[in-house]
Image (cartoon, grey):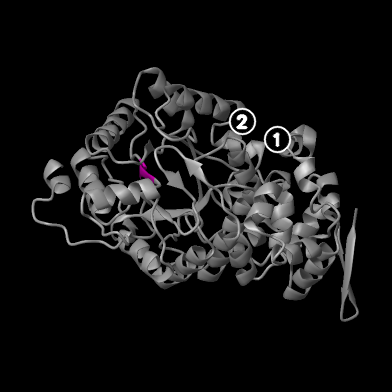
Amino acid sequence: MAFRATIGGTSHVFADLRDLMAKATPIRSGDQLAGIAAASQEECVAAKLALADLPLKAILAEPLIPYDDDEVTRLILDGHDGRAFAAVASLTVGAFRDWLLSEQATPAALAALAPGITPEVAAAVSKLMRNQDLILAARKCRVVTRFRNTIGLAGTMAVRLQPNHPSDDAGGIAASIVDGLMYGAGDATIGINPASDSLPVIGDLLKLLDEIIQRHAIPTQGCVLTHVTSSIELINRGVPVDLVFQSVAGTERANTTFGVGLAMLKEGLDAARSLKRGTIGDNVMYFETGQGSALSAGAHHGVDQQTLEARAQAVARAFSPLLVNTVVGFIGPEYLYDGKQILRAGLEDHFCGKLMGVPTGCDICYTNHAEADQDDMDTLLTCLAAAGVSYIMGVPGADDVMLNYQSTSFHDALYVREVFGLKRAPEFEAWLQSLELTDAAGHLLPARAGHRLIAAE
């Protein structure tokens, strides 16, 4: 089905919904690389006009990737909650945007709607929204998850403590963990990206995390961000695994390049839950996504990268995760060229995830060959804090010495907590107070010489 819109006497024709969605997307380098981006701002505006008049039901009726060709499409359509969708089923994409920004879209209404929102619907409406719209609508969406603490409550923002080391040195990792804890970071998870894929090395890192968490009774969870098959094998060997991690994408072919499929993710979920290590909940999965991953794998099917990102979040949603984050600027300038594109993508990813009921955080980051700097990250951090982001990264000095990219630091988290009055996960906040690391308001206290947390490590 072709779509048309006229601007200034010029008629623009879009071959199908996939073409219309791609052309309506704010310009970014990845879609240009794929040859599917709008050729001009006028064509982009024309696509938005046509998309605004499209009924939401029409998006459900025209899968961007055929049902028979892709298990992600089957997951999305087979799992769609028609009763939840009924609340907005009569709307066009443009009218849905207006509703999301209205007082009718309360947190309760949005929570009830989430199971009825497909990633294509979320992506479509995001393409009509300004940055401030993405912030306002996402701020009203609350997604709460639990394992050893509670993440996503209103007025809170968690931090993943990321103590990576280029040689997986236990002493270096432990020092970074203590550093982060002293700054009040680590309530989302203490998550290590290992330099090695050796099972014995990964097992030792998991044991290190478990020892620190158990010794100090820290109400948080550990994770080594290895392949799901490695986590399953380590669980079978009796290694203490809290969270099972996996990077996922928005198409079956792209996930195949990651070495995963939906059945494998379900196996990881079941294995982690069988350990019953959560004290207050059983959200045991941790997923990372990122715009451009399907294109980089040659598995994008001509679909724009932002819509594919929303589909990746739908994959994550199916497994009741504790944490999901977009590594927004990590894949490189081939996909998000500069700070402006990274900012827009971060706000889109956060909005679409939250609208679908995904506990969305963000690795606010860039690579050193992108046209971006730490001021751009400050802007995105501030916007996401205003939008109610579930969690961010805490990297010593914001410079990851193993992955060689720039992210956010423990100090950056303190900045947004101060500006927006954001608390940590309540159980973690209480633990910090019990160690006299923070006061009742959550502000850091000067660490005494010989503090037991430092002395113990």
The reply to whether discs 2 and 1 touch (Cβ–Cβ < 8 Å) is yes
Q: How crowded is mark 2: few (under 14 residues within 10 Å), some or many (20 or more)?
A: some
**Can residue 304 be seen by looking at this rendering?**
no
User: Is 445 placed above or below 307 here?
Assistant: below
In this rendered view, identify the residue nearer to me: 109 or 299.
Answer: 109
User: Is 42 placed above or below 436 here?
Assistant: below
In this rendered view, identify the residue nearer to me: 373 or 192.
Answer: 192
Q: Callout 2: helix, strand or loop?
A: helix
| Residue at the outermost top position | 237
Q: How far separated are the C-alphas under marks 2 and 1?
A: 9 Å
Disc 1 residue type (three-letter)? Leu
> Magenta stretch: dominant SS?
strand
Disc 2 residue type (three-letter)? Leu
User: Is 101 placed above or below 289 here?
Assistant: below
Q: Which residue is found at the position 66% from the left and 62% from the top?
A: 32
Residue range corresponding to the magenta coloring: 189-193
- Circle 1 sits on which residue? 75
Q: Position of residue 330 (x, y in %)?
A: 47, 55
Residue 221: in magenta span? no
Q: Where is residue 273 in the image (x, y as percent from the top left)?
A: 48, 26
Q: Is residue 262 left or right of residue 425?
A: right
- Circle 2 sits on which residue? 262
Q: Residues within 10 Å of mark 1 (few under 14, many from 20)?
A: some
Q: Which residue is found at the position 53% from the left and 39% from the top?
A: 321
